[in-house]
Amino acid sequence: MAIIGIDLGTTNSLACICQDGKSIRIPNSLGQALTPSAVSIDDDGKILVGAVAKERLISHPSASAASFKRYMGTNKVFLLAGQSFTPQELSSFILRQLKEDAERFLGEKVTEAVISVPAYFNDHQRYATKEAGRLAGLHVERLVNEPSAAALAASQISGKEEGCYLVFDFGGGTLDVSVVDYFDNVIEIIAVSGDNHLGGDDFDAIIARRFCSLQQMDYNHLDPIQQASLLRLAEDCKKQLTSQSQAELVWEAGGKSIALTNIELARLCQGIFDRIRQVITNALRDSSRLMADIDEIVLVGGSSKMPVVSLYLQNFFQRKPCMIGSPDEIVAVGAGIYAGIKERRQDIRDLVLTDICPFTLGTNVVNHADANKPILSPLIERNSILPCSKTGHFTNVYDGQTHISVGIFQGEAYYCHDNIKLGSIEMDILPVPANHADIEVCFSYDINGILEVEVTDHQKKQVKKKVLTSDRFRMSDAELNERLEALQAYKLMPPGGIRTRLALARGERLFAQLLGPRRQQVADAIQQLQNAIRTQNDQQIINYLRITEKLFDHLEGL
């Protein structure tokens, strides 16, 4: 049986099949390649998918949904016609439709698929994607990162044997920026950064709110049908600006209209471009590549076709990005090629796609400044190539300590409670003097998203292991509510005043951004400043504050 490749997108989805060494787009029942990622429930209870459902977003907003990919891996619930659905359940309807379209196109049953995901998806989101596949009746053994799929398709289309790509993947709801190397039939992601809540939908919202502002209307007070209608008009206006310098948004129901130019849109969306710049900067910094090292800037995703976006990128990079194939389809084309590789087809050459760990994995260590707020000690840092295994050595904190709890955390935040807790391993240890215990913690993370944690107490010759598969990475409703309450109740007012608070917040940000020795410098600086704050000695606080600020200025200037 054939394996299909699927790009499950926020705005549109597409399936491809590898035939005769090429990735073939599978048309839907309308003869179109792209299927809108929208779902609606008809009056008779039937599920409508694609273009029809997209239309019903306006006419039947209470029975329709779109852009649910943004909420994959969360406890968000969508209410359609009085029925509750999770994001993965709605996604499964899209996948089921693509599966049936493929079976009709191929004339055979389809039971397996390779699905693309943003490289910046965490393990909750990846698990939810696999679950959506299973709910659609598809076996999904492998997910492929969207930049890997795009680079795979770009290399086939361009015919180049090697190169370094910066893949700018800007869809309806997510942004991924990745640095990808392609050499010796190996496609390797070097670094990735992203924003899972930034995309073309945000442009639509800004245009809609601009319309309301000029017409002295309150967007938030519009009823659901009015909002859906205005957003659709805003989307159409945005699309018009892709091919012309000026467009008009006409809301016939309200008898109102506005004109909008690309220049005005660029000004209105400055906040979006600031977020885009940060994501690009993070990816380049983590890759240790200069722009001179980048052979091609590959545009992926429908939102990358917008002139305001391509012009911004051209100004940022001081060179023109390229469109290799269709930005809307290139990820699906690559997923189709990878499906052919997985199928071991003889008509396509064997390629190797490496994967990375998109988020840091680490354990907790004692915070001597505040024992109630343990600090993250990174073991496998983000952008580590998988499979990966890293070991850390730890010890006891106080004399006679008989127990340790090795927490397992995922995320970039300085404090453990601001990251996702995946689990823990409890160990009883010998009551030895402080700093005399010899505890070894090993994290091993494989290509399929399975994390194995092994804790060894060398003095007791005791070993404990825990294997965390992706299904363990989901948070229950109770855990999510507990996490939200904890964040709302958390207040930090360091005695050093607002300047000190700013320095600490800045340090936490830098800790999340940086890696390796520079990250450790930040951690040490935060700890020293917190220790100074505990003394309540104003002069000591000021001295360490100046040292900390100078260090952070230096690190940000590198």
Image (cartoon, rainbow, N blue to C red):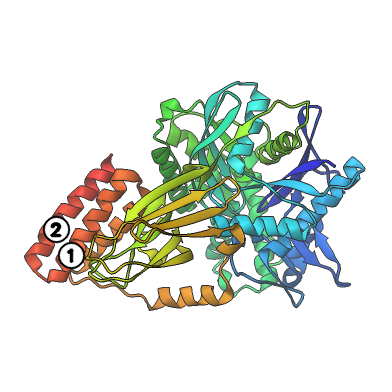
| Residue 2, percent from left and from top | 82, 41
Decide if residue 382 is on the left or right side of residue 224: left
What secondary structure is marked by label 2?
A: helix
Residue 257: quadrant of the picture: bottom right
Decide if residue 118 is on the left or right side of residue 326: left
| Residue 542, percent from left and from top | 11, 61
Other residues around mark 2 within 10 Å, as few (<14) / some (14–19) / many (≥20): many
Visible in this render: residue 373? yes
Q: Looking at the figure, which quarter contains the N terminus?
A: top right
Identify the mark at residue 339; answer none if there is no mark: none
What amino acid type is highlighted by mark number 1?
Asn
Real-space CA distance between mark 2 and mark 1, rounded to the nearest whole angstrom: 9 Å
Q: Which residue is mark 1?
A: 531
- Residue depicted at 73% across the width and 65% down the height: 58
- Residue depicted at 84% across the width and 45% down the height: 102
What amino acid type is highlighted by mark number 2?
Tyr
Q: Nearer the viewer, residue 465 or 354?
A: 465
| Residue 478, percent from left and from top | 55, 77
Q: Which residue is mark 2?
A: 544
- Residue depicted at 46% across the width and 66% down the height: 424
Decide if residue 75 is on the left or right side of residue 518: right
